[in-house]
Image: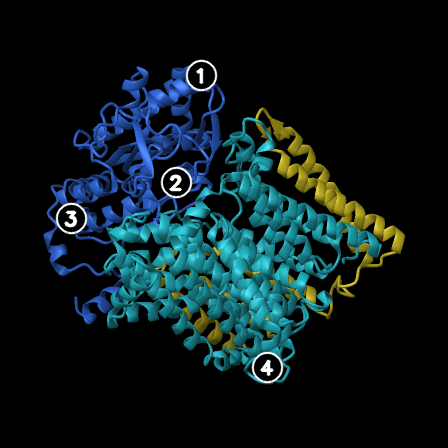
Amino acid sequence: MTIDITRRHLIAGVAGAAALPLAARAQSRLPVPKPAGFPREPIEMTVVYPAGGGMDITARVVQRFVEKHSGERFLVNNRTGGAGLVGHTWLATQAPTDGHAVGVIANLVISDAARSQGRWTINDLDHIAHLNAEPLNLCVNAEGQYRSGGLRGLLDAARARPGTIRVANVVGGYYEYLIEQLEQASGSRFLKVPFQGGGPGITALLGNNVDLAFGFFGEISGHLAANRIVPVAVTGRQPSPFLQGVPTVNSVIGRDDANWGVSRWIAVPRAVPADRKAWLAAAFRAAVADPELVEEFRKLGAMPDPALDTPEKLNAAVQQMAEAERAYLIASGRAQR
Amino acid sequence: MDPVAGLLAGFGVILTWQNIQFIFIGSLIGTLIGVLPGIGPLAALSLLLPATVALPPVGAVAMLCAIFYGSMYGGSITSVLVNIPGEAASVVTCLDGYAMAKQGRAGAALGMAALGSFIAGTLGIVVLSVAAPALGAFAIRLGPPEYTALMALGLACTILMIQGSALKGAIMIGAGAALAAIGMDIITGEFRFNYGSIQLSAGIELLAVVIGLFGVSEILLNVENAARGMAVKARLSGLWPSRVDWAASWAPILRGSGLGFAVGLLPGGGPVTASFLSYAAERRIGKDPHTFGKGRIEGVAGPEAANNAAVSSGMIPLLALGIPGNAVTALLMGALIINGVQPGPTMMTDRADVFWGVVASLYIGNVFLLILNLPMVGLWVQLLRVPYSVLFPSIVLLAMVGTYSANRNLFDLWVMLGFGVLGWFLRKLGYELAPLVLAFVLAPLLEQSLRQSMVMSPDGAMIFLERPLAALMLGAAVLMLLLVAFKGLTVRKLGGTT
Amino acid sequence: MARLDAAVSLFWVLLGIVLCRESVALGLADASGPGSGLFPFLAGLLMLGGGAGLLVRHVLTRGGHAPGEEIVPQFWPAPGAAFRVGALVVVVAGMILAVPYLGFALTGVFGLPILFRVIAPEASWWTAIAVGGIAAACIHLLFAVALGTPLPRGPLGF
């Protein structure tokens, strides 16, 4: 790479005009006609979590490919605050409805909708393109006292000495639900140490300040490679393709609903005109179908779901996720029917 | 790879014409965003993140790092010249730096800030290159009990910062802690004091608070007098730190470096905390504490050294362990991942080129910044000749755009304005605002780690005694409080300080 | 000033009381230790205690203060100060209200000249408009063009 090219890249990037090669513009051949007069400016992909996090990285990778396939410019924009609540609320109630604002969101939007105290629901958004999904990985310290017994051994230890196993928790979500399921399986209580997200929990695990922590692949892969932590189980119906030989939580504790994980997709405000929605959906779909993007996702530890290839199927899946969560909340006594 | 060989290899990686350009551009942008109030390193890095995707990983991360520590250099400039912190870690620099500028010694303050930053930054990097793995391994063992003790020690130090009425200082500490409680309680997941508002549920943005309390309030105080004049009317005597300045400053710079390095190493700690603690320490150690705030160069040299040292040591958990300790290093980690480098303990061996390249870039960047900043002192001081009537409206708009760009949230602008009026009002009544900001930063960390400790301990508060380091630091905090209380009683001046 | 100081001290006492009561409602302790309300409660106590102490001091010393406590002798130091401060706050508030409709650049073009005139009433409107326009343009170039910040746009597309 010569200096001149890089400098131009840099300046182009700094100028916010990550100028697409002209070839990319010509390449655009989506199966859906481009709506008249749209887009007239870069489309903002809103991420409701901070720059540099898992959602943000996913969004920036997707941005490259959706630009390639649509021939239009997209920008990633972080609207942070309140662990996602502010950004989700903005998307559902305030975002422009002309199609220039799309949200890169995850199933965490479901619990945020519940926290919005009735201001909005997930039906205020139209869920147009699925990106990827990944399970939670349950890990123990590679030098800790539970390093060899697997999840079973940990649960047995919990039964033998109730109230001594320290688990990293993130309140009000999947971490908490999963811990409850583990508690039920062991018939004892854990010490649920709360952290602000999965990453800090993994850090505490590395320092042996907790005995069990959950993390997404991106949060653990570096430590796995260095043999600092050992995966003992994964959530979901199938074992993870990234962790060979690690059983599912379901198979260890004999249930079928320990499927907590993250599922990421693109959503737009409901009021966006149908033709623009369809074009956006096609653009993101084309990006996700690109084998190069699938490879990028794999590097991050996530997999696209080929079954969710239309907005209709995605919307149905989102409803299903919301119902599954609600069913769990009711079963665990958190919500009334 | 041993440090010397690694570092040599790192310089081999970084010393290409192209990488040098990236570091230079990063230093320049960093200085600029440091100078501009409102926009801080976090906002600038997230804005520039997309631009780095097209670059090779070492160059990209080197540039982003340069922006981060460059902003620490630049932040002091606005603090000294117009009494408005260029970014949050330069809040305390206003206290003595601006007082020096009013005495015509802006050049000495700026020069010492740049030199202190350089010395501390470089010392930090030397320790980073020699001992990163060992220090990283040590830092990771520290858990919630140690943080609790450390934050308690930090809050106890806040009391040493109070210059006027201790009672008013206590109120400000309380107000800072109360403001920080607004939003989500991470331990229970419940909202506190949000009164049904989604905006309040997100908590109050530190940047908006700092810009309001120090920036907007300063402007309000100044427009009271129909200001025809310039920022500082006093004659400028000498642009360089004198021999006397050096004699006074070398020890604070070294102390600031050590303190900043230790604070930056810990998750949650960062340049902001480091600069406050260094100021408190200098006031405690220095002769004639009552002259602090009236133009003591120690009050500039120490904190400016501390915030740069904290930036250097903050790289250790990130580069050696793949653990970001604060929001800016979290963003740097994202930049590494986007560029295909997985940060973590294996990075030192798997991607030694990136690890040592970035470390080497820190040396180069600090040299650039010194070269950029020292000769420019004279130029910056010319800023004092810009009339208020031009400077202040521009700063208002800058602060608005900068504050907005942090979260893309208009509510933050109202917070900024509200805290501006509040700060203006309280300053007239002799309330000091620095303890409020420090409590705002430290109280949530203290609360979180204290409650985490209590949850993870099967036998309650005993956990603090079972862990020697935590016990030691808690003991120091208690001792400090007792010392202050005892001195206060002997002085027997109600509302007076030691 | 001593009276105002005392009034503000009373305000802290009241605010402290409110905060403590709300914190008790949140719960000072739960099964595992400190509860959601403990820290806000302590913060309220600090304000309450500090404010009460200031009131006591006011009574005992008849409005005296501590060394190093820099209270301004007069709340409004100069004639017209209240107007200038009020005008500045109102203009900035107006600018914040205008941002979603006009965007930052246009808001600056309209707002900065007024701020300029508030601070330097002796200058002409032409100078004010020129200075405001140039400052707004520079800031727009820096943020929107050079840094690529996604900012609200105005009717003219920037």
Image coordinates of residue B66 in percent, x first then y, are 38, 64
Q: Which chain is blue?
A: A
Q: Which of B162 and B366 is in front in this view?
A: B366
The residue where tag 2 is placed is A199
Identify the residue position indicated by label 1 in the image.
Answer: A160
What percent of the width, then of the height, locates residue C123? 57, 78
Q: Colour of chain C?
A: yellow
Q: How many marks?
A: 4
Return the chain for callout 3: A
Q: State the quadrant of the C terminus of chain B.
A: bottom right
Q: Nearer the viewer, mark 2 or mark 1?
A: 1
Q: Which amino acid does label 1 sit on?
A: Ala
Is tag 3's residue or tag 1's residue first in the polypeptide sequence? 3
Given the image, what chain letter belongs to the residue carrying mark 1?
A
Quarter of the image holding residue B242? bottom right
Q: Residues within 10 Å of mark 1 (few under 14, many from 20)?
A: few
Q: Chain B is drawn in which colour?
A: cyan
Q: Distance between the residues labelled 2 and 4?
A: 48 Å
Asked if disc 3 and disc 1 are in contact, CB closer than 8 Å, the reply is no
Secondary structure found at label 2: helix
Q: Which residue lies furthest to the front in this view?
A: B2
What's the CA distance linking mark 3 and mark 4? 64 Å
Provide the chain ID for the residue under circle 4.
B
Q: Name the residue under label 4.
A: B243
The kind of residue on which mark 4 rests is: Arg
